[in-house]
Amino acid sequence: MKFSTFSVKIKIILAVFTPLVVLLGLGVYSWYRVSKSGGTQYLEFSLVAAAILGVFGIAVYRSIIQSLASLKITVDAVIESSNFTKRVANIQDDEIGEAGKAVNRLIAHFEQMVGQLSTVSDSLAQAAETMSGVSNQTSRDIQRQLSETEQAATAMNEMSSTVAEVARNAIEASTAAKEADKQASRGSKVVSEVIT
């Protein structure tokens, strides 16, 4: 259930000033009785008591309103600025003061949580930066490895072509050698026949 500030003030006024009104009523009644009997001592006592209670009631009312206002101002300031270093000031030793202490503990807890979240966030940012550096290095290493692999494949293709060409040249040389051997054998035969 949500109360407006106005309804809270009305309840405080009623709580503080109801006894005062009752006492004033008793004073008026006493005055009426005194006026019939001719004595004034009850009237004077009632007026002094009413004045004292009135001053006391106003002081209590102002104290309560100021404590609640301080509590509200602090909470509003924390909400608007997200500044968790603010605390409720002028805490008295009453129920409203206990509420102020509880609000201060809550704000301190939020401040601690925000600090921890900030630390975790910084750690995550550093980890992400490190991971980015590792990822970039890995990417460079992969590119270098790919380039070296392509160079090796190109070299192997060139070597394969060279080996094939050498093999072809060896075959041609072998064929030429066989042909030369045949020609030499025929030449030797011809020379042998000419000599004989």
Image: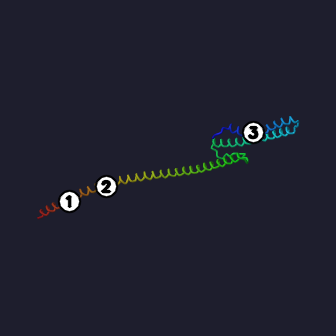
Q: CB atoms at circles 2 and 3 under 8 Å apart?
A: no
Q: Which mark is residue 78?
A: none
Mark 2 or 3: in front is 3
Q: Identify the residue at horizontal 60%, vertical 49% (top origin).
A: 113
Mark 3 surroundings within 10 Å by alpha-carbon count, few (fewer than 14), some (14 through 19), many (20 or more): few
Distance from disc 2 to disc 1, alpha carbons, whole Å, reads 26 Å
Q: Tag on residue 18?
A: 3
In the depicted view, which residue is nearer to us: 113 or 141? 113
Give the residue number, with chain letter if any, for mark 1.
Answer: 178
Q: Earlier in the sequence, mark 2 or mark 1?
A: 2
Residue 66 as seen in the image, left or right of residue 52: left
Q: Residue 134: give x, y in percent of width and height.
A: 49, 52
Q: Nearer the viewer, residue 88 or 150?
A: 88
Mark 2: give few (<14), some (14-19) or many (20+) Cα within 10 Å.
few
Asked if marks 2 and 1 touch (Cβ < 8 Å), the reply is no
Tell me the mark number nearer the camera, choosing from 3 and 1. Answer: 3
Give the CA distance from mark 3 to mark 1. 137 Å
Q: Which element carries disc 2, helix, strand or loop?
A: helix
Identify the element where label 1 is drawn. Answer: helix
Judge whether 163 appears above or below 45 on screen: below
Mark earlier in primary sequence (2, 3): 3
Q: Nearer the viewer, residue 189 or 100?
A: 100
> Marks 2 and 3, Cα distance to the nearest angstrom?
111 Å
The answer to which image quadrant residue 178 occupies is bottom left
Q: Which sits in the foreground, 100 or 134?
A: 100
